Image (cartoon, helix red, strand yellow):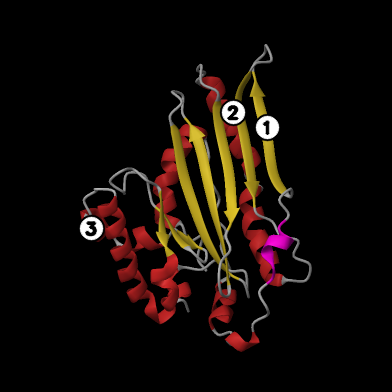
Amino acid sequence: MKKQKLASIILAAAMIASSLSGCALVEFEDPSTAKQEEQTLDKDAKAEKPDVFKLLNADKLVLSDRLKNAAGVELAAYEANFPYFDAGDNQALANINTYYETEFEHLESDKERFFQLVTEKPSQVFRTSVFTYTLLDTPGDYISILRCFESNDILGSVTKTYYCEVFSASTGWSLKFSDVFGDDSSKAVEALRSALEQWSLDKAYTANWVYNAKDEILTENFAFDGDKMYIGLPAYTAPGGETLIELSFESFEDFLK
């Protein structure tokens, strides 16, 4: 797999977020040979999907700190919590752990940049930079995670950026939209555009943006569970400014690889 699949979507969103918080996530690159091996795996030979909810270690990748001034007054908070699994001898979960550990190990320097920004540009607003995640109940041979980066600026305006990730439960490598939907990817994209158009109409928005957007804008940042498809969008893409759209997954079930 190439660098973290968020690529162009997250680049735009991260530029906005970093101006507010100093945050800049580092992306993890999977070895190309491992990706090729995954593509040739026989489905019958794949190991049983682990119970990721039981193996989740919520206390492993956690960072929490407060910035105080000379008088002891708290000015800002930096909170981060990334997924981590008690993998044992499960190499797929170990690979997912490496994916998040690689990002997490850079958060200390990101925190220092954020605190420096707050110190240099003080305000009456209590500033925050917070990473959270939700482990989704994903069907089939997939593990999917929805992450959120939330920050507020010097005026208190809140910005949310979403990182939607899908992994192979057999290998632990990050998957693209085309990996998940295979030969039916074009049909899945059509279903996605149709669902986004209906979502827009339900909100009394114009739906032109759905068909003006390139495929990669709509598909490079996605996650799913048994009920919903989550689409993360760059800021200012959707008419109402939404950066996460929730759709019914029913329209996509038949296209799963």
Q: Residues within 10 Å of mark 2 (few under 14, many from 20)?
A: many
Report the mark closest to the observer, 1 or 2: 1
Q: Quadrant of residue 76?
A: top right
Residue 51 within the segment the image draws in magenta: yes
Compared to residue 133, the image places residue 4 above or below, namely below
Q: Please name the residue that numbered disc 2 is placed on.
A: 115
Question: Residue 74 is drawn in which quadrant?
Answer: top right
Q: Which residue is mark 3?
A: 212
Residue 204 visible in the current orientation: yes
In the rendered image, is residue 24 in sight?
no
- At label 3, the amino acid type is Asn
Name the mark on residue 65.
Answer: 1
**Helix, strand or loop at disc 3?**
helix
Residue situated in front as seen by the camera: 236 or 188: 188
Say which mark, if any, is on residue 231: none
Q: Position of residue 63 (x, y in %)?
A: 68, 40
The residue under the point 29% across, 48% down is 203
Residue at image position (36%, 62%) is 216
Start-end of magenta stretch: 50-56
Query: Which badge, 3 or 1, comes first in the chain's sequence?
Result: 1
Q: Amino acid at mark 2?
A: Phe
Looking at the rendered structure, the kind of residue marked 1 is Asp
Q: Are marks 1 and 2 in contact (CB under 8 Å)?
A: yes
